[in-house]
Amino acid sequence: MTHYSYYTKEGLKKLQEELNHLKTVERPHISNAIAEARDKGDLSENAEYAAAKEAQGLLELKISKMEDLVSNARLVDESQLDVSKALILSKVKIKNSANGTLLEYTLVAENEADLKVKKISVESPLGKGLLGKKVGEMAEIQTPGGKMKFEIVKISR
């Protein structure tokens, strides 16, 4: 079964740039390191060669995984988002019912999450709790400190 990942245009571009960097910069760098280590002689006792070959294997695995991500990526058309309920790429304003604090987050794919810019993953406990909720509904979120309740105040793009 194919697992699709959903990205904003910006998120997909970042992923493609990272993949390109791995292929055009990192891959040649490791090839050079292997060639230099090989030129130093006996490969059976050459720690530099073994380390470079291991690094190459790890890099190729990372490249392969990223190629899969890119090939299974789907762009989300932000102009077509339904704002009647909280979905991926929705900006959701919530109110903590315990203390009245207002918070606003954008729900994003796991790999685009960045709390510093208030982007939370739909896979996180808060993200999962908000998904599918409508304005006025309550989201009960299980946190390490116990259950918290949030009221959905506003949903926008």
Image (cartoon, rainbow, N blue to C red):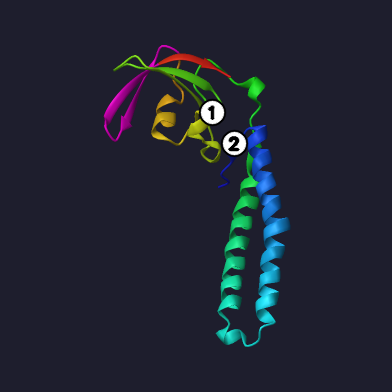
* Residue 6, label in figure: 2
Where is residue 64? Give x, y as percent.
Answer: 63, 57
| Cα–Cα span, label 2 and label 1 | 8 Å
Q: Identity of the amino acid at label 2? A: Tyr
Residue at 69% x, 46% y is: 17
Residue at 69% x, 62% y is: 27
In this view, the residue in front, 113 or 155, is: 113
Q: Identity of the amino acid at label 1? A: Ile
The 10 Å Cα crowd at callout 1, few under 14, some 14 to 19, many 20 or more, is many
Residue interval drawn in magenta: 135-151
Look at the numbered discs 2 and 1 and tell me whether their residues touch, using CB distance below 8 Å. Answer: yes
In this view, the residue in front, 93 or 64, is: 93
Q: Quick one: quadrant of the C terminus?
A: top right
Residue at 30% x, 24% y is: 148
The residue carrying mark 1 is 88
Instruction: Find numbered disc 1 in the image and state the secondary structure of the residue it sits on.
Output: loop
Where is residue 92? Give x, y as percent.
Answer: 49, 20
Instruction: Find numbered disc 2 in the image and state the secondary structure of the residue it sits on.
Output: strand
In this view, the residue in front, 130 or 143, is: 143
